[in-house]
Amino acid sequence: MVQIKGTAVLDTVSLVKKRGGEDGFRRIVALLDEDARKLFSGEVFTSSWYLLDLFTQFLEVEIRESAAGNEEVLIKGSEAVIERQLRGIYKVFVKLGSPEFVLKRIAAVHATYFQGVEIEVEMMGPGSATIRYTGYEKQHRIIGFAIIGFFRKALEISGAKNVQARFATPIEAGKGYAELAIRWT
C-alpha cells in the first residue's frame, strides 16, 4: 500500500485552488468517490500519510475537469512546487552541488514524500541518469507527470541545460518498477 505525505497533498490542493478557486476545488471534490471525497473535504495534515490511490484519483479528476485531460499540466504544476521549495527550504541543495549532486539529494527528499516506494539514482555518465522507482502500481501512472516536472525543474535550477526527462519504463507498464531517464548538458 503506497502512501503520500500530507505536505504533497496540501501543495496540490493549493495549486488547484489557485488555478480554479474554491468553487473549482469543490466541484472536483464532488466528483470523487466517497473515500477520496472524505479526504479532500476534511482537514489534511502536513505530517500525516494518505493513500496514493485517493490522491491520484483527485489528480485524474482535476486534470479531466480543469485542463481538458491534458496531463502535461501536472509537469508544470510540480515544477512550480519544486521551484518554490528549491528557492526556499531546500535551496542549500542547489547551491552546494552539481546536477548529479542535486539529483541524488532531490531523490532522497522525494523519497520522504512516499511510503511504500523505493527510489534509486544511477548515474549513467556525464549528463545522464536513470531514476528507478519500485512500489508504484499501474493506477498511480499519473504521478509520473509530477515526477518528470520535479526532476526537470530541479536540474534546471541547478544550472543544467537542455534537460530531457521521460519514462523509459512507465509506471503503467506494471512491471513492479518504473525508470525515469534523464539527460542534460
Image (tube, rainbow, N blue to C red):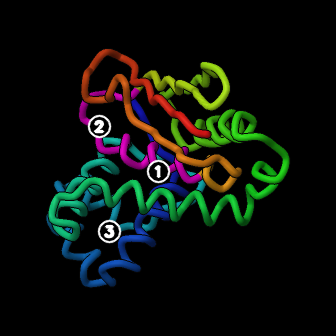
Give the main secondary structure, helix, strand or loop, of the magenta stretch.
helix
User: Where residue 68 sits in the image (x, y, percent)?
Assistant: 15, 65
Of the numbered discs 3 and 2, the one sitting upstream in the chain is: 3
Q: Of discs 1 and 2, which sits in the foreground?
A: 1
Q: Is residue 128 left or right of residue 3?
A: right
Residue at 47% over, 41% down? 164
Q: Nearer the viewer, residue 12 or 132?
A: 132
In front of the other: 135 or 36:
135
Name the disc covering residue 141, or none.
Answer: 2
Q: Who's the residue at 30% across and 48% down the image?
A: 56
Q: Between label 1 and label 3, give the one nearer the viewer.
A: 1
Of the numbered discs in the image, which one, if any, rests on residue 167? none
State which quarter of the image contains the N terminus. Answer: top left
**Residue depicted at 42% across the width and 71% down the height:** 15
Residue 137 in the image: state x and y as whole percent.
31, 28
Left/right placement of residue 109 relative to residue 55 reads right
Q: Is residue 182 magenta?
A: no
Sequence-first tag of 1 and 3: 3
The residue labelled by disc 1 is 149
Q: Which mark, residue 41?
A: 3
Comparing marks 3 and 2, which lies closer to the viewer? 2
Label 1–label 2 contact, CB within 8 A: no
Q: CA distance from mark 1 to mark 2?
A: 14 Å
Magenta region: which residues? Answer: 136-153
Q: Position of residue 48 (x, y in %)?
A: 54, 51
Within 10 Å of disc 1 (Cα), the crowding (few <14, some 14-19, many 20+) is many
> Toward the viewer: 131 or 118?
131
Q: Amino acid at mark 3?
A: Ser
Q: CA distance from mark 1 to mark 3?
A: 27 Å
Please say if 81 is above or below 171: below
